[in-house]
Image: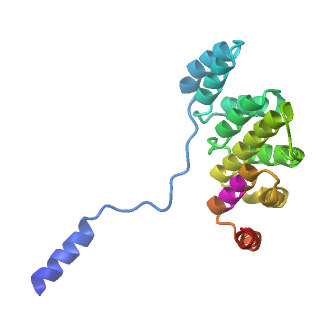
Amino acid sequence: MRTLLLFLVAGLLARPAVADGPKKPVPHTDEQVAPVLEKYKKDFAEQDLDKRLGALRALGKWRHKDVLRELKRVFLKEADLELKAAAAEGLGRQTCFVSDAGRTLVESLDLWKTWASREDPKGDDEVKNEDEARVLAAALDAVGDLGWKEGWKALKPFIEHDHDSVAGAMMSTCGKWKEYRALPILLEWFNFY
């Protein structure tokens, strides 16, 4: 019995210490990001949309204040909806700047809440409706990835959005947040289907 206790105590003492909670992400340095920004500016200046999207997605993987600034610029000012969606995905990775990225996403979502809400779209309207839904879903996913809950009041109506992928993205965001205030609305959806 003593031997067993000795082995148990030795096993407990030999375990590595567990850190207190997850580590806070650290931004990349200016030296690390400078060549990435230079390549991005060169590739993003091209007319080819695929090259521009690739450059934007590569840039979005870096956590830096200049990257955040460029992602916000593209998300807010570019007319192309595919570029806006890619910028939203990149903003979701800016975990060092949660409130800045989250605020940008939520304020834009609040302004664009009527997007992808056309009744029975046909032709070009159907394509635009799907592209708008892609932007909204990417932005909602990004807010969920950031864990920025301060926009709950503005985002709550997206649970009942006309477009299923937008409503689904908001439900997923509520799940990532573990947002208890969404439960009554989610239960209504569950009972509806």
What residue is shown at x 86% (from left), y 47% (from top)? Answer: 117
Decide whether the magenta segment is chiefly helix, strand or loop: helix
In reply to whether residue 187 is colored magenta, the answer given is no
Q: Is residue 136 above or below residue 39?
A: below
Q: Position of residue 37 (x, y in %)?
A: 63, 21
Q: Is residue 74 left or right of residue 90?
A: right
Q: Is residue 157 visible?
A: yes
Q: Nearer the viewer, residue 167 or 96?
A: 167
Residue furthest bottom in the image = 1
Q: Nearer the viewer, residue 29 or 146?
A: 146
- The tally of labels here is 0
* Quarter holding residue 187: bottom right
Q: Is residue 60 left or right of residue 155?
A: left
Q: Position of residue 70 (x, y in %)?
A: 72, 28
* Quarter holding residue 157: bottom right
What residue is shown at x 67% (from left), y 53% (from top)? Answer: 144
Q: Is residue 150 above or below residue 106?
A: below
Q: Is residue 133 above or below residue 151?
A: above
What residue is shown at x 71% (from left), y 67% (from top)? Answer: 193
Q: Position of residue 43 (x, y in %)?
A: 64, 15
What residue is shown at x 20% (from left), y 76% (from top)? Answer: 8
Q: Position of residue 62 (x, y in %)?
A: 58, 33
In reply to whether residue 171 is colored magenta, the answer given is yes
Residue range of the region highlighted in magenta in the rendering: 168-174
